[in-house]
Every structure is written in C-alpha cells, then in structure tokens.
C-alpha cells in the first residue's frame, strides 16, 4: 500500500504545480542586504543610484513581509529570516537587540527568551544549519546578527557597520548578512515602530534613502564580482503594511521577475523564502521547520528597470487599495443586505413591489462575482484607484443583473438564478484553472499586502463557489426532473394514511395582485430514473468543484473540502428523494475530512520544496504541532462571531428564512413556499448550501465570513425565483384537507 501511495505521489508530482528548481550553482557566496522599510516607489536613478544599478543587474519582485501581526517590525523580519517560518518576538516591536562582542564574533543577549518565553522554537534555524554544514557566518549590524545566529545566539564574525569591516573579511565566510537600518531608524519612536504611516516628510525620507543607498553601495563595492546578492526590504515602516523590494543578483537572471513556489506567483515572494534561498545557494540542506522555498527568476521579462519598478509599485497600490477599501466594502454589503431583508419583509407582507424586490435581489447577488470580474480591468492604473475599483464593481454587478433579468431566461423562475449562479461558478472555476489572478487583489479575495493567502481558493471565494455550484446544479436537476414532475402532477394522488410520513411539503400559494389562492404540494422527487440522473449530475458537478477547490497548487483549500462534501451529499440525496439524518450528516463531514487528509498526505509525499500548506499540515501532525495550528484557527473562527460586518448578514438572512417559512403569508407573501413548490431541487440546493455554509464556518478561520457570504448569494437568488414562481401556474398536488405549508414545510426532512 505504501509503495502504491509513493508511486501515485510521483505521478501526481509531475502534474501538480511544484517548486521550480534553481539553475544557479550552489558552491559560491551569498550576501543578504536587508533594508527594512524599502519600497519600490523609493527607487530612482538619481535618489538611489546604487540600488538602481543593482536592480538593473538582478531579478526583481515584491516581498510580502507579513509575519504574525498586522504589520512587521525590523525585529520580526530578521527573526523570521533566522527561523525560516513566520515569527514574532511577542512584545512591543522595534529594532533587533545589540549583540555583545565575543572574540571575533558576537552573542545576542537574552537569546534563550525566544525559545523559552516567546515560543519561537525555530529561532536560530538558519545559523544552526550553516554551522552543521561546517560553514561560518558573518553578520554586519544587529539585524544581521539576529538572522545568522545559531540556537545559542552566536555568530562567528560580527561588525557593527560596514565601515568597520575590511574587504578581505568578506571572503572568509560564505553566508553573510548586512543590516542597513538608516531608512527605518528615523521612523522609530522610543525604539518602537509607530502607528502612523507617514512619520517622515518626503524630504526626510529621501535623505534617509540616500544614507541607506550609500551604505548598501559601500557593501556592494567590497564584494567579489561572483557573489550572489539578495536585497530585501525586510519590514514595514509604519502602521500600514506594504509590499517591499526583493532583488537577486546572480548569473543570467537580470531583466526577469523574481518569484517563488511558496506564493505560486512569478513576481512575489515571502520572508521565509529568504532563509531557503540562502541555504540553497550555499548547498546547505534546509531544516524541516523551514517553510519557505528558494527564490526563482521567472521566465517573464521585466522590460527594463523602470518598467519593472512601475509594475511592482502598482501591485503594492492594488494591494493597499484592497486593504483600505475592504472594511468599508463589507460594511456596505452588510447594510445593503439587512436593508434589503427589512424592505422586502415590509413590502412582501403587503404583497406590493414584488417585481422591484426581484430586481434588487438579483442585483445584490451579482455583487460578489463582480469583485472578481473587475480585475479583468486595469483599475489600479487609474489616477484614483478607489473610485475605479468601486465603479468597476458597480458596473459589473449592474451589467450581470441586467443580463440575468433581460434575457429570454427571465420568464422562467429559475432563469436569473441560473445566470448569476452559473457566472459565479464559471468565473471562480476559470480563475482556479488559470492561476487565481482574479481572486488576488479582490475585496472578496486576498492580497499579498495582507499576506494571509497568495494563491488558491480563499475562504470567502469558497463560500461563493460552493453556493453557486450547488444552486446551478439544482437548476440542472430541476430541468432533468421537470417532465417527471409533470407526469406526477397528472397522476391521481393518494392521501396518506394516518401516521404515514409525507416526504414532500405542502405549500400555500397566497393571493398576489388579484390572483386566486391556490394550494400546492410538491411530490417527492425520488423514485424515478430522472431523479437518480439529476442526483448524479449534482454529485458529479459538486465533486469536480470540490476536487478543484482542494487540489494542491490549484485551490489548496483544506477546510473547503470538509465543508463541500456534506453540502454536495445532502443536495444529491434530497434530489433523489432520500432522507438525511444527523448520523448521515456527521458521516458526510467525516468523509470530507478523510478526503482532504488523503489529498494532503499525497502532497506530503512530494519533496518539501513542492509541498503546499496541505502537505505541511500532515508534517505538523507527525511533529505534534497540528493541535497548535487547529487551536489558533479555532480561536480566529470564534473571533469572527462578533464581527459587526459579518454577523448582521447571518442574523438577518436566517431570521428572514425562518419567519418566511413558518409564517409564509405574513412574512413573504408565500414567496419561498412558491419557489420550493415550483422547484423541489432548488429547496435541496438551498439546504445543501446552508449545510456547507455552517460546516465551513466551523472549520475555517474566517468563520462567520463563510456562512454570511453563502447566505448573501443564496437567499436573494431564492427569493427572486419565488417571486416569479408566484406568477406561474403551479400544479395542484394536494387533496383538500391537508395541512398548510406553514406547518409542514419546515419538516424533519428539511
């Protein structure tokens, strides 16, 4: 069995995206020059001539400096390089401590604090690995000493500044780090990183840049020509995060973008990648705890230093805009959602304005996918990126809503729902298959500036993807079973004997604008070949989407698989006319966990540099670190339950659903019962969506965001279908005397 798994892992390793192998030699010298706070907008031929010249000879990219907190101070940045994993000192953060000279080298005072108190078990991994390989370390400046110190806090050769080191000393060790802190020092207040973003004027920052450029130039002038140079803007400089500068000077890499397999981007890297790169270039094996992978020059050309600088600066602008707009955007979505349910409740109980409610529902449901479609436009190139972004989202949403409501499908109750759900599912599936360029820098996606995720299926995109796939699959199932339902409508209906359980709900159809009241009852969809085929279609579409979302290097979504499986199973079973018990639901959740752990284990069998976070989680299970990861994510999930932007959407949508089902005439003019009577498949799809949303909320650190966005898409679309269904002639299935829907619609089978 083990040999089979290994063989399968080898085959899949050829298919899965993996870490590109470095083509550079591994027998030379590598120097890391860290300039905390350096951004691409800082570089120019006149203001920073040495850095500009280095950029022209290097592969260049963006560096995401996210560690643990919202912003990264110099101490945390250098500590992360030392550990090879995102790290933080755990208290007020500023510059690294001053080393104490010890013969030729130095020792960092109180270094054991990092291991015993701060919980940074990996601190010293870089220096320890270099020493284990028989090499020495040379550090210039406090930050460099922190990065290269071994687990005892010691570096072999130390100098406080480049002015105090001789050129011949730079040839003694193959692993060198230089701390250029001239840019960051003026920003510090009491040795701590300030909360404000712009602590310096433009003139003061330019002066600090000139000092940093001169110091970096002095180091570069002393290095042998064949030395590989890594330059990194290792930290933030204020209260807001930014993308920073990353350069790698080596043979045959100039004029290319710089990326890494850790981000699956050819122009973006992360701090732990620096650790892996330094070890790789010197031929030293990376310790198991290092999560980064070596930097890699991409095939994509930059088009020149200035062109690259503009492109990388715009990437920072895009990420910063998304970060700034995100809170306001979700507040607006929450307000619109709550206002929609309130207005819909007031109008529908009076049976007025239903057509307007339908338009508003489709428009609201068109907003989420529009946050991805807008990335097909160069909005971040505009003079006012915020206005371009907001205008683009609004324009895409209105265009999609108009298409859904104006096409020939508008006459069918499920027509607009199918269009919006189908477009949402297709956009996200296409994005997963093409490198997730639409989710990157999206308000409902993620950004490298925030640094929570760089590729794959995010938690909110998962909620939208699962919801849209299940609803769209339900519309297909509706069409497949339509003829079968018509045949059943024409057949005589036997009244159930006392004590029998009716499998399908009975629905009251209230009067609307003069229409007569009709009472309908949906027959069960099961028991026919059509229902079995429909259930198979739901399982196939859902299964494909689930694999796409969980596949390493494509969706790489661990919790999404666990949540998607029960949603698919519940929808398919209900369409097939089967009952779903709590035991079955629990079994489906366990099945989701088994599937995702199987995928993760196959990912774990690949080389460490090719693994995604799925495979690394399996490694954490073996090392005993998994419980700590689970606890941290569970704590983050609980924190979202008090989020003022997310919970109002959940509360309003759930309250509306429950009241509309229990009191259909008083709350919604019978819209939801009419929708379910017209399409039992839609009812199954909505229940499956709610199952995925609830399970997804519990197993993802985004928590309430998953359920709230699932409801924000599913409930308005269901209402739009129900409003149109009120105008349709729904077959009369019920015998006189059966109980009304308000009592039976919410049943154990639901």
Image (tube, rainbow, N blue to C red):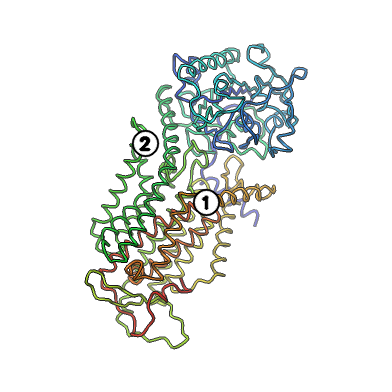
The answer to whether residue 479 is seen in the rendering is no
Q: Give left or right: position of 316 versus 522.
A: right
Q: Can residue 703 be seen in the rendering of this structure?
A: yes
What residue did someone put label 1 on? Answer: 642
Image location (x, y in percent) of residue 289:
66, 39
- How many residues crowd mark 2 within 10 Å: few (<14), some (14–19), many (20+)? some
**Which element type, helix, strand or loop, lies under badge 2?**
helix
Quadrant location, the N terminus:
bottom right
Q: Is residue 684 above or below residue 41?
A: below
Q: Height in image: 449 above or below 226?
A: below
Please state if 594 lies on the left or on the right of 545 as rendered: right
* Residue in front for this viewpoint, 301 or 384: 384
In-image side of 265 versus 735 (left or right): right
Say which quarter of the image contains residue 664: bottom left
Identify which residue, 564 or 635, lies in the foreground. 635
At which x and y percent is residue 104? 75, 17
Which residue ends up furthest to the bottom in the rendered image?
Answer: 497
Earlier-in-chain disc, 1 versus 2? 2
User: Which numbered tag is attached to residue 386?
Assistant: 2
* Residue at (57, 48) in percent of width and height: 636
């Amino acid at each position: 069995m083990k040999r089979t798994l290994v063989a399968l892992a080898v085959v899949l390793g050829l298919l899965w995206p993996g870490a590109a192998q470095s083509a550079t030699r591994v027998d030379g010298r590598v120097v890391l020059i860290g300039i905390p706070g350096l951004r691409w907008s800082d570089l120019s031929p006149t203001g920073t001539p040495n850095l500009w010249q280095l950029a022209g000879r290097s592969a260049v990219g963006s560096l995401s400096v996210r560690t643990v907190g919202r912003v990264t101070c110099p101490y945390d940045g250098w500590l992360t390089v030392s550990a090879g994993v995102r790290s933080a000192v755990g208290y007020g953060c500023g510059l690294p401590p001053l080393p104490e000279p010890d013969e030729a080298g130095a020792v960092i005072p109180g270094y054991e604090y990092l291991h015993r108190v701060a919980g940074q078990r990996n601190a010293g991994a870089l220096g320890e690995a270099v020493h284990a390989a028989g090499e020495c370390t040379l550090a210039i400046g406090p930050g460099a000493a922190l990065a290269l110190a071994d687990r005892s806090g010691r570096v072999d050769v130390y100098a406080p500044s480049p002015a105090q080191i001789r050129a011949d000393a730079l040839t003694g060790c193959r692993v060198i780090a230089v701390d250029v802190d001239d840019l960051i020092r003026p920003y510090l207040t009491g040795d701590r990183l300030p909360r404000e973003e712009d602590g310096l004027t433009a003139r003061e920052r330019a002066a600090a840049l000139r000092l940093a450029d001169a110091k970096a130039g002095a180091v570069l002038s002393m290095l042998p020509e064949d030395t590989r140079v890594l330059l990194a803007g290792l930290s933030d400089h204020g209260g807001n995060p930014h993308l920073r500068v990353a350069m790698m000077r080596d043979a045959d890499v100039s004029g290319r973008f710089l990326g890494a397999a850790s981000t699956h981007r050819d122009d973006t890297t992360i701090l732990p990648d620096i650790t892996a790169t330094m070890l790789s270039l010197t031929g030293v094996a990376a310790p198991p705890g290092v999560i980064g992978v070596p930097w890699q020059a991409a095939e994509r050309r930059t088009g020149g230093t200035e062109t690259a600088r503009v492109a990388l600066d715009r990437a920072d602008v895009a990420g910063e805009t998304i970060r700034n707009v995100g809170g306001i955007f979700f507040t607006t979505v929450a307000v619109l959602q709550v206002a929609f349910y309130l207005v819909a409740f007031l109008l529908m109980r009076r049976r007025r304005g239903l057509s307007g409610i339908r338009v508003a529902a489709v428009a609201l449901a068109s907003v989420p996918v529009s946050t991805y479609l807008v990335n097909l436009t160069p909005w971040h190139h505009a003079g006012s990126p915020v206005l371009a972004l907001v205008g683009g989202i609004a324009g895409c949403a209105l265009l999609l809503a108009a298409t859904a409501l104006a096409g020939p499908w508008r006459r069918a109750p499920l027509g607009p729902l199918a269009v919006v759900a189908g477009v949402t599912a297709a956009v996200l599936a296409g994005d997963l298959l093409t490198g997730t360029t639409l989710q990157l820098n999206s308000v409902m996606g993620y950004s490298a500036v925030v640094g929570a995720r760089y590729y794959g299926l995010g938690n909110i995109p998962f909620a939208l993807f699962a919801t849209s796939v299940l609803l769209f699959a339900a519309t297909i199932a509706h069409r497949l079973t339509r003829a079968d339902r018509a045949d059943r409508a024409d057949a005589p209906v036997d009244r159930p004997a006392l004590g029998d359980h009716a499998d399908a709900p009975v629905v009251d159809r209230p009067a609307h604008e003069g229409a007569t009241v009709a009472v309908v009852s949906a027959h069960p969809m099961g028991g026919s070949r059509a229902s079995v085929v429909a259930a198979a279609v739901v399982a196939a579409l859902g299964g494909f989407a689930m694999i796409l979302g969980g596949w390493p290097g494509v969706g790489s979504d661990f919790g999404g698989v666990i949540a998607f499986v029960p949603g698919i199973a519940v929808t398919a079973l209900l369409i097939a006319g089967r009952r779903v018990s709590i035991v079955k639901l629990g079994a489906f959740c366990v099945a989701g966990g088994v599937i995702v752990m199987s995928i993760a284990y196959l990912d774990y069998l690949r080389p460490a540099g090719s693994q995604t976070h799925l495979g690394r989680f399996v490694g954490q299970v073996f090392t005993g670190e998994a419980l700590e990861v689970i606890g941290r994510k569970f704590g983050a999930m609980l924190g979202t339950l008090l989020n003022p932007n997310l919970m109002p959407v959940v509360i309003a949508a759930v309250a509306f659903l429950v009241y509309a089902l229990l009191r259909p005439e008083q709350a919604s003019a019978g819209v939801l019962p009419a929708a379910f009577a017209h399409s039992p498949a839609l009812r199954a799809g909505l229940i499956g969506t709610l199952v995925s949303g609830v399970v997804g909320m519990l197993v993802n650190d985004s928590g309430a965001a998953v359920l709230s966005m699932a409801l924000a898409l599913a409930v308005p679309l269901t209402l739009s279908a129900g409003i149109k269904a009120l105008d349709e002639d729904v077959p009369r299935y019920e015998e006189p005397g059966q109980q009304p829907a308000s009592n039976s619609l919410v049943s154990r089978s639901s």
